């Protein structure tokens, strides 16, 4: 529990950073207390460090005393810059796909992209509150449901449905260019054996079976535009969502209880007004809500794209991540609200950043061994578990031997099992976003003189939120103001 400063004394960007730190720290703001609680105040000192690395080495300038924790304004400013991608938004550099290159990212420039530095700043805040509390009561929101300490979201971008031999030939050419002759030969043999089959459908069914056997539900992002020769040559739209093959995949995914979101085509970045028609087309096909979106090839216009996504009815985006490396593009291993100084009205729109993608390694880093991909994913598992956060990864469903990826399905089975064995809460992104939105709303209504605590939250009926003490024990239920 913590008493926050008067919001009127903070600039909007500072309010955003402070709210984010408190949310990620799991500290609970108190509305009223009959006893003394730890107070958070904003410090004016500038400190020595100017780089992100220097700030982190200084514990982000966060200090504590008896019943007080001080967070400098410079820390709040830097956190907002990192999370909102301020440096990338100022950059005019673009790669051949119209994306801001990862080299323009502030964390990449300091070699920190593998570390969720903002999530660690939140841990520093929590540790300062616990240290400054002395005998004062401390309560935290339990990090995830059912006593879980971290979470995992498996996601799949459906880029290929038909015309698979063309994709296999391109992939074999890619392997040969990397002098992976043995792997190319295995792929060619698998493709020849599957020539009379439907290997994309088979790969999807195999992936669904792996997840079903482990009680895993995942999130699938589906292209929902009309392909042309131009879009196919660009690697953009390659199938009609109404085609027989696509409908079969959509039906299989939906019947297994997985989530379906939109994979926004290239034109949604160039003409953001296309988000709404593509979402409506997907809703008509699935007869289900479409809450999430991820951009194809990760093509996005920061601030503008998210603003239009929110206006089109989406509740979250999952585009923020690197195409050419794995790590934490926004410095956060968790769900967080989107904020930009020029579009503050989208603060209720969430970002579900991914930190790992298979093709970041095979396409961009030259690593073709699927076992090495999984080892990299599990390394980031460990990082996310350390900060009690969320690991979100992208596994493309066309990664199968006939399509040029021998050994990949077996590696994915190992990745699934590692998440289960690691005790993660595994769910769809929409469920995770919904739960985190409710967790963020938890407040202490009052702390009575006798120690009784009344907590409340805005949450759907049946959602259980719990408080715990600084040691993770002494669990107490949060009263939910039930949402419709």
Image: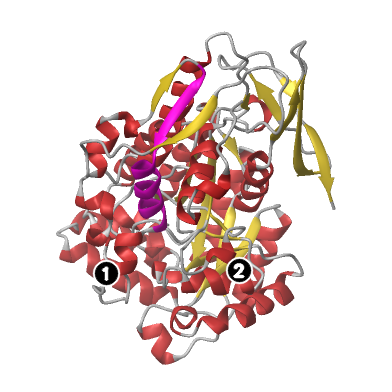
Q: Residue at x 64, y 53 (%)?
A: 430
Q: Is residue 284 left or right of residue 154?
A: right
Indicate the secondary structure of the residue bearing disc 2.
helix
Q: Residue at x 51, y 31 (%)?
A: 40
In this orientation, which residue lies closer to the viewer: 446 or 418? 446
Q: Which residue carries the number 2 mark? A: 310
> Quadrant location of residue 149?
top right
Residue 399 on the magenta span: no
Find the distance from the CA under tag 1 to the CA under tag 2.
24 Å
Q: Is residue 351 visible?
A: yes
Of helix, strand and loop, which mostly describes the magenta segment? helix
Is residue 480 positioned above or below 163 on the image? above
Q: Which residue carries the number 1 mark? A: 91
Numbered range of the magenta stretch: 67-84
> Quadrant location of residue 43?
top left
Is residue 53 positioned above or below 317 on the image? above
Residue 364, how many percent across, how many down?
25, 59
Mark 1 surroundings within 10 Å by alpha-carbon count, few (fewer than 14), some (14 through 19), many (20 or more): few
Going from N to C along the chain, the mark reached first, 1 or 2, is 1
């Amino acid at each position: 529990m913590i008493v926050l400063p008067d919001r009127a004394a903070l600039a909007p960007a500072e309010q955003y950073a402070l709210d984010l730190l408190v949310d990620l720290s799991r500290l609970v703001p108190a509305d009223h207390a009959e006893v003394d609680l730890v107070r958070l105040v904003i410090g004016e000192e500038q400190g020595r460090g100017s780089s992100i690395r220097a700030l982190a080495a200084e514990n982000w300038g966060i200090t504590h005393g008896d019943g007080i924790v001080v967070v400098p304004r410079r820390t709040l400013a830097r956190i907002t810059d990192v999370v909102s991608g301020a440096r990338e938004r100022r950059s005019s550099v673009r790669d051949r796909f119209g994306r801001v290159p990862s080299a323009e990212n502030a964390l990449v420039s300091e070699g920190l992209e593998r570390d969720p530095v903002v999530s660690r700043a939140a841990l520093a805040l929590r540790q300062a509150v616990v240290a400054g509390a002395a005998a004062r009561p401390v309560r935290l929101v339990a990090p995830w449901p059912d006593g879980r300490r971290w979470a995992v979201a498996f996601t799949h971008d459906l880029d290929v449905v038909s015309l698979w031999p063309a994709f296999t030939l391109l992939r074999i050419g890619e392997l040969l260019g990397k002098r992976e002759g043995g792997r190319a030969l295995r792929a060619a043999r698998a493709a020849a054996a599957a020539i009379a089959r439907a290997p994309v459908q088979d790969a999807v069914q195999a992936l669904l079976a792996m997840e079903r056997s482990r009680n895993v539900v995942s999130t699938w992002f589906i292209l929902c535009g009309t392909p042309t020769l131009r879009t196919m040559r660009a690697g953009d739209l390659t199938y009609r969502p109404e085609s027989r093959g696509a409908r079969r995949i959509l039906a299989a995914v939906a019947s297994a209880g997985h989530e379906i979101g939109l994979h926004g085509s290239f034109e949604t970045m160039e003409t953001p007004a296309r988000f709404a028609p593509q979402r409506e087309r997907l809703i008509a096909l699935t007869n289900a809500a479409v809450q999430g979106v991820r951009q194809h090839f990760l093509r996005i216009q920061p601030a503008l794209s998210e603003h239009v996504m929110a206006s089109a009815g989406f509740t979250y985006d999952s585009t923020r991540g690197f195409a050419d490396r794995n790590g934490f593009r926004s410095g956060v291993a968790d769900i967080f609200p989107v904020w930009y100084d020029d579009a503050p009205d989208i603060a209720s729109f969430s970002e579900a950043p991914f930190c790992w993608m298979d093709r970041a390694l095979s396409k961009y880093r030259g690593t073709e061994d699927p076992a090495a991909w999984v080892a990299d994913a599990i390394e980031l598992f460990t990082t996310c578990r350390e900060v009690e956060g969320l690991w979100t990864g992208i596994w493309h469903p066309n990664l199968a031997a006939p399509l040029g990826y021998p050994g990949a399905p077996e590696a994915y089975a190992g990745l699934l099992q590692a998440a289960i064995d690691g005790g993660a809460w595994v769910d769809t992104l929409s469920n995770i976003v919904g739960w985190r939105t409710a967790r963020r709303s938890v407040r202490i209504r009052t702390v009575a003189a006798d120690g009784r605590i009344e907590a409340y939250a805005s949450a759907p009926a049946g959602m259980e939120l719990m408080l715990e003490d600084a040691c993770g024990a002494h669990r107490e239920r949060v009263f939910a103001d039930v949402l419709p």
